Amino acid sequence: DIVMTQSPDSLAVSLGEGVTINCRSSQSLFYAANSKNYLAWFQQKAGQPPKLLIYWASVRESGVPDRFSGSGSGTDFTLTITSLQAEDVASYYCQQYYTSDRTFGQGTKVEIK
Amino acid sequence: QVQLVESGGGVGQPGGSLRLSCAASGFTFSSHGMHWFRQAPGKGLEWLTFIRSDGSYRYADSVKGRFTISRDNSKNTLYLQMNSLGPEDTAVYYCAQDCGLGGSRDFWGQGTLVTVSS
């Protein structure tokens, strides 16, 4: 199985400040046939199902604010929130969907300082 | 648009069984692989099992031998038969459409809660 490692486990940031979450996979998620990285980012607020933010490592899902962005390729990926808003308090998960045995990072909890 | 609606959750007895269903619409169900995931209270997301369009399947070690995935393409429905339930199976269970390599993203349902308790 592909192991996904996220960092940090949690962070507290002031409103308006930036947030960076890292995700590393144990093998490449790059699919050469279409030049896409099969890495997704989810946001999960308390009591709600996970919400897809980013797919193909960097494509924002429809309706997701542009302060959220994804980057990276191969085995190293980053989710960036450029200016944290109160409604962004949540846990964030990376997920590889390169293999049918999907795997997730352990999650990063983002709070307001 | 893709819609996935899970049902069948509730309270199950330790050692007992439950069957979850996932009703699919908005896409050609028979052509897609499908997944089950879960999330225990306060824990992260966990992949459980996958069934391909041809009916072949894979399981996570945590549920192998206890859970069975199946599909009824005539009813556009995915199932998860859960046997030998234990407290560790208490979770919200989600089904998802597999996009496959070449596709863009999976689609998820809203989940159904399973509580294992006597």
Image: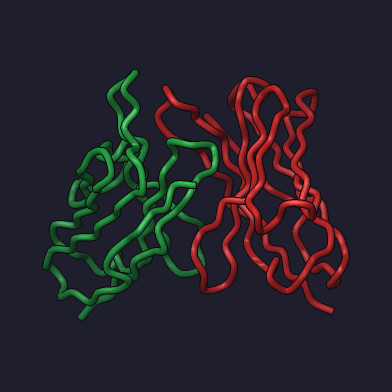
Chain colours: A green, B red
Q: Is residue A109 above or below residue B66?
A: below
**Residue A43 falls left or right of residue B19:** left
Residue B70 location (% of width, % of height): 77, 37
Q: Quadrant of residue B25?
A: top right
Q: Quadrant of residue B53?
A: top right
Q: Residue at x 30, y 28 (%)?
A: A36
Q: Quadrant of the C terminus of chain A?
A: bottom left
Q: Residue at x 70, y 55 (%)?
A: B63
**Residue A28 falls left or right of residue A102:** left
Q: How many marks?
A: 0
Residue B77 location (% of width, % of height): 74, 34
**Residue B14 falls left or right of residue B30:** right
Residue A35 location (% of width, % of height): 28, 24
Q: Is residue A105 above or below residue A12?
A: above
Q: Is residue A55 above or below residue B15?
A: above
Q: Residue at x 18, y 63 (%)?
A: A19
Q: Quadrant of residue A56?
A: top left
**Residue A56 falls left or right of residue B5:** left
Q: Nearer the viewer, residue A110 or B82?
A: B82
